[in-house]
Image: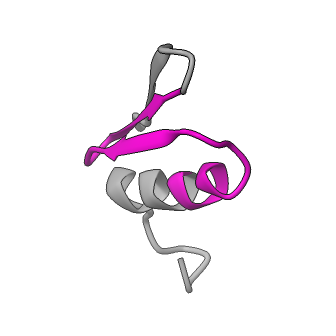
Amino acid sequence: MEKQNANISVKDLTEEITLLIKGDIVATYTEEEDALQVHFLNGQHFRITVAEM
């Protein structure tokens, strides 16, 4: 993400979002190429998906 005109890949954006979320939310995580699974201690699970529009 050095150049303003460079394309950002789904994988790169997913990795950036993952870093931000992991710093603030206590949970375990499973990283995928286009998604992040969040597993909370109370048993709830979520998948956060990134898709280009």
Tell me where residue 28 appears, x and y as whole percent. Answer: 45, 41
Q: Is residue 53 visible?
A: no
Q: Is residue 47 visible?
A: yes
Please report the bounds of the magenta region as a residue range: 18-40
Image colouring: one colour
Tell me where residue 6 appears, x and y as whole percent. Answer: 47, 74
Left or right of 53? Residue 23 is right
Question: In terms of depth relative to the viewer, which is nearer, 23 or 6?
Answer: 23
What is the count of numbered marks?
0
- Residue 27 on the magenta segment: yes
Q: Relative to residue 25, is residue 2 depicted above or below?
A: below
Q: Residue at x 44, y 59 (%)?
A: 15
Farthest bottom residue?
2
Tell me where residue 20 appears, x and y as whole percent. Answer: 65, 57
Q: Residue at x 55, y 39 (%)?
A: 27
Q: Relative to residue 7, is residue 30 depicted above or below?
A: above
Left or right of 19? Residue 10 is left
Left or right of 52? Residue 24 is right
Left or right of 19? Residue 7 is left
Q: Relative to residue 5, is residue 52 depicted above or below?
A: above
Q: Relative to residue 15, is residue 35 depicted above or below?
A: above
Q: Residue at x 41, y 38 (%)?
A: 52
Question: In terms of depth relative to the viewer, which is nearer, 26 or 33?
Answer: 26
Tell me where residue 4 appears, x and y as whole percent. Answer: 61, 76
